[in-house]
Image: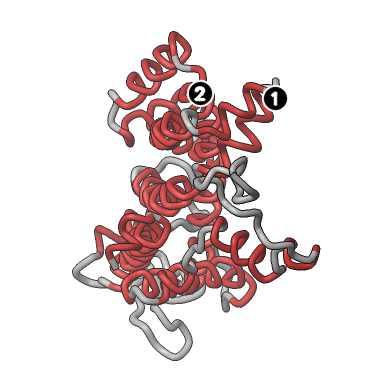
Amino acid sequence: MGNRGEGVPASLPLAPPATSPAARVPAAPRLLDVASARRPTRPSIWRAILRQRLALTGACIVLFFVVLAAVGPFVAPNDPTSLVGVPLQGPNAEYWLGTDEIGRDVFSRLLHGARVSFQVGLVAVGIAGTVGTALGLVAGYRGGWVDNVLILLMDIIFAFPAVLLAIAIITFRGNNLLNAMIAIAVVFTPAFMRIVRGATLSVRQTQYIEAAVSIGTPLPRILARHVFPNITAPLIVQVSLVFAFAVLAEAALAYLGLGNKPPAPSWGSMVSGSYGSLRLAPWASVIPGAAIGLTVLGFNLLGDGLRDALDPRLRSAH
């Protein structure tokens, strides 16, 4: 029967050839390729914004008025509350935008009013964004009766017209600029709460949140370190849009004589004070009205551009 390999089945594979230790070690570039493949490439947000002309136009308008609000009061040629010329004097070399109904420099009041409008918008959006984000995180993550109670409170606030609710709050707390900021913040808090709650509901089901819960991570740390950084995209868009409405709300309240008391300058009060002389001196009310409209337009265009740049679905469509 001889030595013909009776004990070795024909189906067994032959032993692999011996390889050196260096051959068994994967190459370094291959490891880098795997790591880079796992890391998703994210297109530049700023490039996406720069490709959109309307968003870039809005950013330029907003930047112009931000600079105007920052340096305007320091370069204003006259005191915004002083009577410096003949009432309803047209634009000239001394008064670039003319004078209002009692002889105050419209250009100086416009510069000072820009700071008031942006100050109100910044404080109101800061308060509304902070409170609304906190409530939205808690409501979206906890769910249950906590979510139902917070949604009910926001629905109650939504039931009132925005300007009417702001007037009621100012009437109850007192007519001054601080209370106008608080009133505008209360009006826009539900908008932030709903945006954050919806984003939190979609994020809390992800695997990294479940992993953080499984290892016993405290709830405040989960919300601050894992949930909030992943919902900033819709929040940034909401900030830009609400800022525009806050500036418009401040102008509406000032037009009604609420908030920034006369003779302190405000774009809304400038429109209100010069409305009676619109035919004789249109510049006194049209110019601050145009400033309000351009500011709101700039923030709206910027918000639309940010939405298109931060939303991956819209970004891939472009």
CA gap between label 2 and label 1 equals 14 Å
Mark 1 secondary-structure assignment: loop
Residue bearing the label numbered 1: 217
Residue bearing the label numbered 2: 141
Residue at 48% across, 70% down: 46
| Residue 83 in view of the camera | no
Name the kind of residue labelled 2 in the image: Tyr
Q: Answer yes or no: do the residues labelled 2 and 1 have beta carbons within 8 Å? A: no
| Image quadrant where residue 74 sits | bottom right
Q: Return the residue nearer the eye: 252 or 271.
A: 252
Q: How crowded is mark 2: few (under 14 residues within 10 Å), some or many (20 or more)?
A: many
Residue 310: x percent and y percent? 42, 57
Q: Return the residue nearer the eye: 291 or 85.
A: 291
Q: Return the residue nearer the eye: 180 or 53.
A: 53
Residue 63: x percent and y percent? 49, 71
Q: Classify residue 127 as left or right of residue 161.
A: right
Q: How crowded is mark 1: few (under 14 residues within 10 Å), some or many (20 or more)?
A: few
Residue at 50% across, 54% down: 263
Name the kind of residue labelled 1 in the image: Thr
Q: Quadrant of the N terminus?
A: top right
| Image quadrant where residue 192 sits | top left
Which disc number belongs to residue 305?
none
**In this rendering, which labeled residue sits more in front, label 2 or label 1?**
1
